Amino acid sequence: MVERSLGRKALSLKSFESMIDITETDFRNFDLNLLLVFHALMRERSVTRAARRLFIGQPALSGALKRLRLAFADELFVRTSHGMEPTPRAIELARAIDPLLVMLQQAFHQRPSFDPVAAERVFRIGLSDALEVALMPEVMRRIASLAPGVRLISHLTDGRRASDMLDAGEIELAVGVFLEAPSWQRRRALFDWTFVCIYNPQQVKVTGGTLSMEQYLAYPHLLTSFNADLHGFIDDQLEKLGHTRRVVLSSRNFATSPLIIRQMEAFTTVPTFVAGAWREALGLSVSKLPFDVPTHVVSLMWTNLNDADAGLAWLMTQFTALFSGKAFV
């Protein structure tokens, strides 16, 4: 769809079509390069000088002039003692052709611009609910200050679905952990994260300020699982070490766990970016896990169709300015 390939900018396909009424068959037998020949002849009033200006031979330019005369059913340029003089029809055509060539030249050399202060645009981004909680408060505060006319629509996605949603035009930008992407999709790393343990210090006392394996396994656990399973990645890591933990709740939603943690003696193990947001908002405590876990990277991802989208480039710059290399805890 035209709307999607343009990044769903303000013009809809219907309004775009209503602005442009072109009969393609009118151009089927016309070489648009002839307009440059016409422009050169109007400027030079000489076949020889016009050919030199266009870096072509004089016979080639003479042939192009014949085709112009045939296309417009007019002599266009008449040889006189003062050179090639344009006919009234040529002068009339020049009034239309010269501005067209100027606009085309400007389009070739000017990149699309985006003025955040004046912009009225809606961006559609895809990210998990955890990243939404961690990132969007700062993003929205920044956008409200820099671009008051810009609005965002957040779509729930993950590393598996984001690529298809980008290709389908459902979102313009994805934020998440993307282990691989097709060649036509771009990625830009934002920050690293790992898993940490979070709890209410009024409910759970971690002695010595460092969480031990014994303490970690002594309390019940809440698990966020997209598969709604009582066994997750952390459980796989513990099994490799010969341990198991007791998971008492599994939920697809990150928003549930911190409210429960505040009210009971329990742990939940979450990404550092989520832990940082919960610690600040709810007064919870964060501890490093008593065993090693890998580090992951959160990245921006978009399609190469939007490489020249100045507005999307501006939005990605805001994410980069806020979160590039950030340590959340």
Image (cartoon, rainbow, N blue to C red):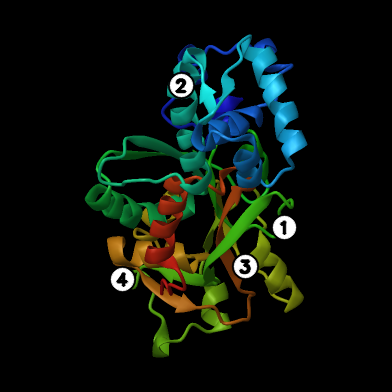
Looking at marks 2 and 1 on the same chain, the residue that comes earlier in the sequence is marked by: 2
Q: What element carries label 4?
A: loop
| Image marks 4 and 1: residues in contact by CB distance under 8 Å | no
Frontmost residue, 176 versus 290: 176
**Secondary element at image label 2:** helix
**Would you name the residue on which mark 3 appears?**
245
Amino acid type shown at disc 2? Ala
First-in-chain label (1 vs 3)? 1
Task: Determine the CA span between mark 4 and mark 1.
Answer: 42 Å
Marks 3/4: CA distance?
22 Å
Residue ID at (36%, 53%): 259
Q: Nearer the viewer, residue 96 or 211?
A: 96
Query: Is residue 120 visible to us here?
Result: yes
Which residue lies at the image location 47% right of the left edge and 55% below the top edge?
Answer: 131
Choose mark 2 or mark 1, whichever is in front: 2
**Mark 3 in CB contact with mark 4 (< 8 angstroms):** no
The part of the image, by quadrant, that contains residue 284 is bottom left
Quarter containing the N terminus: top right
Q: Given this view, does label 4 or label 1 mark the residue nearer the observer?
A: 1
- Label at residue 180: 1
Q: Crowdedness of circle 4 by 10 Å Cα count: few (<14), some, many (20+)?
A: few
Mark 2 lies on residue: 96
Q: Is mark 3 on a helix, strand or loop?
A: loop
Read off the residue under disc 4. 202
- Circle 3 packing at 10 Å, graded few (<14), some (14-19), many (20+), is some
- Check if mark 1's residue and mark 3's residue have beta carbons within 8 Å: no
The disc labelled 4 sits on which kind of residue? Gln
Front residue of this view, candidates 292 and 138: 138
> Of the residues under marks 2 and 3, which one precedes in the sequence?
2
- Quadrant position of the C terminus in the picture: bottom left
N-terminal-most mark, 4 or 2: 2
Between circles 4 and 2, the one closer to the viewer is 2
